[in-house]
Image (spheres, rainbow, N blue to C red):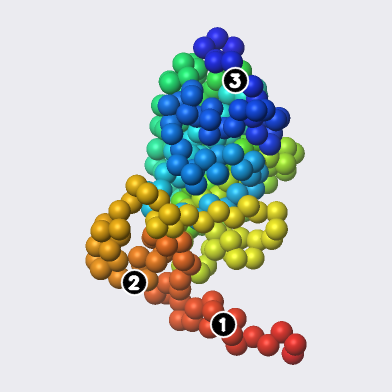
Amino acid sequence: MHGFRRVRRVGPVEGESDLRISEWARVELRFAADERQAELLDSGARWLLLCCSRQWGKSTVTAIRVVHHAVFRPGAMVVLAGPVERQAAELMGKIAGFLRRLRVPWKRDGVNRHSMVLRNGSRIVAVPGREAFIRGFSAVTFLVIDEAGKAEDALYAALTPMLATTDGMLWVMGTPSGQAGFFYEEWMMGGAHWTRVAVPATECGRIGAEFLERERVSKGEDLFKQEYLCEFLAGPEQMFSAEVIDGCIEENL
């Protein structure tokens, strides 16, 4: 594999190693992860729900995990999705930047506009954000859904069967957007197979307290809590919040 640096395989799919992914990122990609970012990279999470503040760096951390997966698992198939194609394409841009740092060559697959094929046979494809245009991918080893709070349920339903034959990794990430949709439902009721990680802005040293206070004043308390504090709150289109509805249910009846 010309251009690939010699790094022992790391992580839940690639096998065990003394070198953690966060350390690999620091040495090979010149990316110094903060404490929470390193925790996520080194967690070994396969089915991940990442609920985080705006500007925490979720796209950068995810791009690092995708690059590691594609480089050290020959023949990997990575699919990136989001509510709009532009967001997945921006994630591809970060991935391309990290591959350049590694001096790993790639080319497009000749079919998909936003795609990469590495010399080891691994593929990375960013798909459109509409269910009707994403069917046909199979044997996916790593599926990433970005801005999940804005993505449609039909998109999620069409994507997850792509993991059926590989039992591959699934990372779903975003900022809360109301008390409806698959991101909210999986976070609240999705089961124990998920690794849930919440990172509010108050736990990110790169976001200052003065900035957050200005955002609180300008955006209002409810929007601020969703955008920066990772709280799922009822949207304006919801007559009753989930908490009110739950309080009206008597399970013993």
Residue occupied by mark 2:
221
Q: Specify the amino acid type for callout 2.
A: Glu
Q: Residues within 10 Å of mark 1 (few under 14, many from 20)?
A: few
Element under disc 3: loop
Q: Nearer the viewer, mark 3 or mark 2?
A: 3
> For residue 120, what is the image quadrant?
top right
Q: Which residue is mark 3?
A: 7
Q: Give the Cα distance between marks 1 and 2.
A: 22 Å
Q: Is residue 122 left or right of residue 250?
A: left
Looking at the rendering, which quadrant does residue 24 occupy?
A: top right
Along the horizontal axis of the image, is 237 left or right of 118? left
Tell me residue 171's x, y (percent). Answer: 58, 46
Other-residue count near label 3 (Cα within 10 Å), few / some / many at <14 / 14–19 / ≥20: few
Q: Is residue 167 visible?
A: yes
User: Does residue 178 lie above or below 70 as drawn?
Assistant: below
Say above or below: 4 vs 244.
above
The residue that appears at 55% across and 15% down in the rendered structure is 4
Amino acid under disc 3: Val
203 sits to left or right of 247: left
Comes first in the chain, label 3 or label 2: 3
Which residue is disc 1 drawn over?
245
Residue plotted at (59% across, 15% down) = 6
Among the two numbered marks 3 and 1 on one chain, the one whose residue lies closer to the N terminus: 3
**Badge nearest the viewer, 3 or 1:** 3
Q: Quadrant of the C terminus?
A: bottom right
Label 2: state its secondary structure. helix
Front position in the image: 216 or 155: 216
Q: Is residue 150 visible?
A: no
Please rate how many residues cluster around mark 2, counting C-alpha atoms within 10 Å: few if below 14, some from 14 to 19, many from 20.
few
